[in-house]
Amino acid sequence: MILILGGGDTHIDPMTAGGPSAAYANRVSLDGKIGAPPPRWHTPRSAYIHVPFCRTMCAYCDFATFAGVEQHIPAYVTALANEIRIGSPGANPDVPLETMYLGGGTPSLLEPAQLETIITAIATRFGARLNLAEVTLEANPGFNPAVIGSWVNLGVNRVSLGVQSLDDPTLKRLGRTHDAETAIRAVLALKACGSISVNLDLIYGLPWQTLEMWQEHLKRALETEPDHISLYALAIEAGTPLARQVSSGQWSVPDDDLVADMYEVALPELTQAGFRHYEVSNWAKPGHESRHNLAYWRNEAYHGFGVGAHRYIDGRRSWNVRSLDHYLAAMQSGRPVEEGSETLAPDAAPGETAMLALRMRDEGIDFARFMERFGIDPRERWRTIFEEVAPHGFLRVDDSRACLTDRGLLASNDIASRFL
Ligand SMILES: C[S@@+](CC[C@H](N)C(=O)[O-])C[C@H]1O[C@@H](n2cnc3c(N)ncnc32)[C@H](O)[C@@H]1O
Ligand code: SF4
């Protein structure tokens, strides 16, 4: 790991990060045996950091984010750095951190110096235990390309761009502040820097979108040659401007069959463009899978910092206050920012893990990993479900794993919920 603090940018080089950490050196006993690291489902290797600021609110979005309050960004960055320094409740600090995800909101709104404050807090907190392989920054395509060099210097090696569509009328209706040309320029600038893996988020199933329009939008997105693509079916969230437009009759909710057709037509296009479909909504070129998100789908532990952030540590899920004012006030007066928590009943954890595992198209429910983690054989535990679902062509079961087929992925919510 190269970590240079002071005298300029904090530089964390994730590509050269690695090697046994000081914490592991301490695990070597006198007979030379190295103690096993705590399991990934107990102790986080990943940290999510929430940046709840956007220039304007998009018509469909109900994330924990706020527009028009950018004057609070400096105080928020200070509070976030403090929360990171204090550390996650219950987390064992002796384990290397491998992935970091700055999500939002719009983290690309932060100045490089503000990002540096956050990343330095992580570097200070984890010290020699920093072993970052992936640092993701969510960005709005309207960012200034001149900052890319600073992002790289800070160790960012993956950028997730909220492109949503490459059709200008669609972007306008969604309330986005960028146009298609800006998005294309952003992808090209990121790719040109040579060390950033680029993801595009696209939304389909829009009320005004025909199947042909969607195919055209996807084709344009593929022409920019991203490394990773996330396709999200529009969810009409209560209380958003889009939900109001639907209830006033301006738009009608798209037909489920049409939305399923949009998903289905995307599958061969993406395969042909060299992407591997590795999760229900995610496709990657080889080696560009999101390691951070894989930890969620494997139901592994993770830290969460910031407004509304969730964490999962040692079987306990907890979440922070969702109000920016409450978060800032609590951090300023030294009160906890955690608002609630739950510990899953031991017999519920395998079902939840199976449900998430089925989202991963080729990995699916890994029998050996299940045995190691829960001491149960999924083939015994869910024999009836396997026997009912597999003959209909929804599930592939072999000696090592059970995975959804492409047909099964279309019914993934229904099938996965049976495991709960
Ligand atoms: C956490 S958001 C942040 C991304 C970034 N702020 C942006 O939009 O430019 C991640 C992605 O979730 C998706 N998303 C947000 N709200 C959605 C909704 N109501 N339905 C479907 N997808 C949604 C969008 O594709 C978005 O890019
Ligand atoms: S920019 Fe992203 S987080 Fe912000 S309102 Fe739009 S979709 Fe939501």
Image: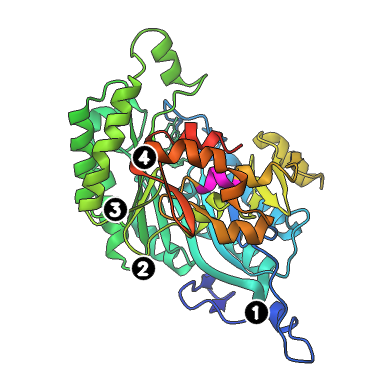
* Residue 195, numbered label: 2
Looking at the image, is mark 1 or mark 4 nearer the viewer?
Answer: 4
Considering every residue shown, the one lying at the far top of the view is: 248
Q: Could you classify mark 4 by the number of other residues whose Cα lies within 10 Å: few (under 14), some (14-19), or many (20 or more)?
A: few
Give, as a single range, the part of the protein colored magenta.
353-357
What residue is pinned by disc 4? 393
136 sits left or right of 260 in the view: right
Badge 3 or badge 1: first in the primary sequence: 1
Image coords of residue 411 (percent x, y) = 41, 33
In this rendering, the answer to whether 333 lies above or below 196 is above
Badge 1 or badge 4: first in the primary sequence: 1
* Residue 89, numbered label: none
Q: Could you classify mark 2 by the number of other residues whose Cα lies within 10 Å: few (under 14), some (14-19), or many (20 or more)?
A: some
Looking at the image, is mark 2 or mark 1 nearer the viewer?
Answer: 1
Residue 304 in view of the camera: yes
Badge 2 or badge 1: first in the primary sequence: 1
- What amino acid type is highlighted by mark number 2? Ser
